[in-house]
Amino acid sequence: MMKPSTLICSVAFGIFASSTGWTVENGDLPTAVTTKREMVVTANPLATAAGAHILKIGGTATDAMIAVQTVLGLVEPQSSGLGGGAFIVYYDAAANRTITVDAREKAPAAATEDRFVGAGGFTNAWQSGLSVGVPGVPRMLEYMHDRYGHLPWQRLFVPAKVLAEKGYPLTERTSDQVAGLLAANPSCAEGERLFFRDPTAFEYFADPADCTARPAGTLMRNLAYAKTLKALARWGADAFYQGPIAGEIAQAVQGDLNIPGDMTTEDLHNYQVVVREPVCKTYQGYQVCGMGPPSSGGLAVGQILGLMEHRPDLMGDDPLAVETVHLFTQAGRLAFADRNQYVGDSDFVPVPVAGMLDDSYLAERAALITEVDMGTAEPGDPPGAVGPGAPDNTVKLSGTTHVAIVDRYGNALSMTTTIESSFGNGVMVRGFLLNNELTDFAFSPTDNQGNLVANRVEPNKRPRSSMSPTIVFDADGRVALVTGSPGGSRIIGYTAQSIVNVIDFGLDPQEAINVPHYMNRNGRTDIEEPIPGVTLEYDAQALADALISKGHSVGIIEQNSGLSMIQVKEHEHPGPGNRKHRGKDKRSQRLLIGGADYRRDGTVGGR
Ligand code: GLY
């Protein structure tokens, strides 16, 4: 099953150079991986290996995604899993069609708009039964396989099941994150812990004898998870949404040791994924397609790019030029102002999707950008907006993981998948963690004037997300780039910047990922401190000073992206025949170029 030889990752000494001629001496940095047939990029080597194996035996991108997701839920349990939700942008090569699949968690039918009022603050609500949304991942796996799978369903659960039974080594990242959360508890005693209050999760991730995180390298077995996978493999998603597993989920939520929630088995029984049209924006001759509401990702990424395109006069010559950073962050301010004001679940509230990406509207908004920081941006008035409403300015923390896959059949899959914050709400049922996604809703349904927030809690509604799985198409409609990232609301900036780095500056995916991040979510401008051997060395203080002279308030911070990117380059070449055949037998040759994020445990696989 796990064939290390299918795993390709390389770190090489190199000079960082772009096709624009911009060159930076950068010592040892990860370099891109290339393949010809298929590729998978994830945030964990075991998940990448599982996906690469499935692709190698003829599986589709969907088949590989199922193996990857089930392995990620085991080996990177803090980020995603069966108890969470996901968004997919999927290019179906046979139909030449792009769809998005919304497997976002839903509020229970009993949820009311004042759900979090009086919940004792964000952290307390986060670690409670109130925050758990009805999971979408298992239904999504089945939905995708029914339509786009090729290999037998049961086969796709084998990698994760074997790892769960035989054991896998705990990563340093997971161990460190457990330690961080344990340290945040006021006391480690049973009944006094908030993080890992659930004894099952506590005993799995920590040593109860001394309340320390299990060390990196510990061989972790998860037999309960193996059993859940067997049930899913045998009975399909109904094994999760009905019967004993659903009963245990509802019981765990209703019996939460901090604050009981209200999810019922009926909520689980009723869960369905929704197929939605992608939200697409043209950019420099490309078509950038992402996830629409309930995610704000596609709209905000599209707005940032659209706003930048309207101001070529302000664009810099390289990704870290102060002009580039200034323009990108001003576009970020404007995009976040609109996102906070207008985006919620469009099945419940009107979202001016077309208006927010309308070119004349973006031209008008881009005219607000000057040489100096604009300060807090007010939302605009896009065509189709219904007001007045109130913004949801909450800044979300990071969890989540991103998967990029291209298969030999030409299908492309971009999936961002999450249980919200690190380890979700910290409660383990049958070997998987429950999400705390409902804290992505606004905590208050109105502002001080009584105006309703689009992203307020309502029964059966999906909370607004920032997840931005993206596929970029070239002028001929061919897949050019698959990208996306974890990172809370920073996802939007990470993803938009990855696209700018490739399209505007001609970087390959790994070079694009290696560039330190910057963004502005309509507050402070954050720039990423360099990470030796992982990101480009640069003088962060000099950039901060240059931005400060333009009026920015700047934070130099550690950032936590997890970009997974695949660039597809196709060119036709004459067939193998002699001169007589030349031109009649043209073949399209494909080069897949992968970039993984070494800020996490990113890896590229395929052949
Ligand atoms: N929980 C991360 C997001 O959906 O934006």
Image (tube, helix red, strand yellow):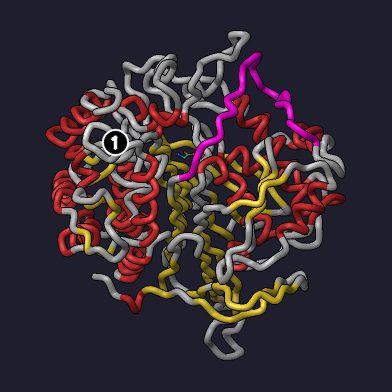
Question: In the rendered image, which quarter contains the C terminus?
Answer: bottom left
Residue at image position (25%, 63%) is: 218
Q: In this view, does 78 lie to the left or right of 553?
A: left
Query: What span is colored magenta in the figure?
Result: 374-398
How far across and how far down the image is residue 73, in percent? 30, 51
Q: Which residue lies furthest to the top in this view?
A: 450
Placement of 54 over or under 421, stated as above or below:
below
Image-based side of 77 in relation to 291, left or right: left
* For residue 344, side relative to residue 59 (left or right): right
Q: Which of 302 and 27 is in front in this view?
A: 27
| Residue 588 visible in the snapshot | no
Q: Which residue is drawn at 61% across and 43% down?
A: 280
The answer to if 81 sits in the magenta stretch is no
Q: In which quarter of the image is residue 127?
A: top left
Q: In this view, does 143 lie above or below 381?
A: below
Q: Mark 1 points at which residue?
A: 193
